[in-house]
């Protein structure tokens, strides 16, 4: 499939949850507490897109396809887009921009503190995800983009800390994230490199 078509399909797919949520909100079809429903949905989609973005490099390595790395930036920006919706829901619909309340929340509730930290880490990633920054920052761009590993860890922690009893869902995200991060460790990559070298020689 041509890369432009793959990108267009993924773009439509990326927007779909937001469009559906907007439609449900407009139709007043989000249950007894629509603000809570929007917060939960946008929070989960932020985490999902972060993990999907992280899955692209291993997918390329395991499959040999090149398209996963070419759509990676767009997927990461979708994670940021849902994080913005999530944060705006909290600031606007939940707290009505009451900055003193928001500040108290950030310093008093650890799950909000780490959520905020995760968002702050995503900011430089989103702002530097353009060709100009890649050129300008050189090797530092790669270093900066290692934050893409830290932000989802904080995102999972944020989720884990806010659920009171049933940790099943955050635990599933934590396992998936751990697997994606483990696949980046040198021993695993050495294996892959050795396999590629053997295949090249054979
Ligand atoms: C990368 C950043 C973030 C990620 C990945 C994230 C993810 C999540 C997830 C997965 C949930 C739970 C959804 C569910 O229950 O199904 C959630 C809930 C929530 N998040 Fe975030 N979040 C992030 C940043 C933030 C920020 C910056 C704030 C506000 C300052 C925030 C405030 C909340 C609130 C208020 C809830 C609902 C808590 C409740 O149910 O009582 N999040 N978030």
Image (tube, rainbow, N blue to C red):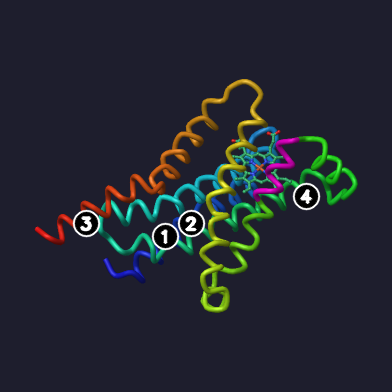
Between the C-alphas of marks 1 and 2, the distance is 6 Å
The magenta region covers 110-118
The image quarter in which residue 143 lies: bottom right
Q: Is residue 7 above or below residue 36?
A: below
For this rendering, which residue is in front, 21 or 68? 68
In the image, the residue with mark 1 has its CB under 8 Å from the nearest atom of ligand 1? no
Q: Where is residue 97 in the image (x, y as percent from the top left)?
A: 84, 51
Q: Where is residue 202 in the image (x, y as percent from the top left)?
A: 9, 58
Q: Are marks 1 and 2 in contact (CB under 8 Å)?
A: yes
User: Which residue occupies 51% across, 30% down?
Assistant: 171
- For mark 3, does the 10 Å Cα neighbourhood hold few (<14), some (14 to 19), or many (20 or more) residues? few
In the image, the residue with mark 4 has its CB under 8 Å from the nearest atom of ligand 1? yes
Q: Where is residue 155 in the image (x, y as percent from the top left)?
A: 60, 42
Q: Does the magenta stretch include residue 151?
A: no
Looking at the rendered image, the quarter that the N terminus falls into is bottom left
In the image, the residue with mark 3 has its CB under 8 Å from the nearest atom of ligand 1? no
Q: Which of marks 3 and 2 is in front?
A: 3
Between the C-alphas of marks 3 and 4, the distance is 49 Å
Q: Give the labeled residue for mark 2.
A: 14
Q: Nearer the viewer, mark 3 or mark 4?
A: 3
Left or right of 115, for residue 141: left
Q: Give the labeled residue for mark 1.
A: 10
Image region (quadrant) for ligand 1: top right
Q: Give the labeled residue for mark 3.
A: 196
Sequence-wise, the earlier of marks 3 and 4 is 4
């Amino acid at each position: 499939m041509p890369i432009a078509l793959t990108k267009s399909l993924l773009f439509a797919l990326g927007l779909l949850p937001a469009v559906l949520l907007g439609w449900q909100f407009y139709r007043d079809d989000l249950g007894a507490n629509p603000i809570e429903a929007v917060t939960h949905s946008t929070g989960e989609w932020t985490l999902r897109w972060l993990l999907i973005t992280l899955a692209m490099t291993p997918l390329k390595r395991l499959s040999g396809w090149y398209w996963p790395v070419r759509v990676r930036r767009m997927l990461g920006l979708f994670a940021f887009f849902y994080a913005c919706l999530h944060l705006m829901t909290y600031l606007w619909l939940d707290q009505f921009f009451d900055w003193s309340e928001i500040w108290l929340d950030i310093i008093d509730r650890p799950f909000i503190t780490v959520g905020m930290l995760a968002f702050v880490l995503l900011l430089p990633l989103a702002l530097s995800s353009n060709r100009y920054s890649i050129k300008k920052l050189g090797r530092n761009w790669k270093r900066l983009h290692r934050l893409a590993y830290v932000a989802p860890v904080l995102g999972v922690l944020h989720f884990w800390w806010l659920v009171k009893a049933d940790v099943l869902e955050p635990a599933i995200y934590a396992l998936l994230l751990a697997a994606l991060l483990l696949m980046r460790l040198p021993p695993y990559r050495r294996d892959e490199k050795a396999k590629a070298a053997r295949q090249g020689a054979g």
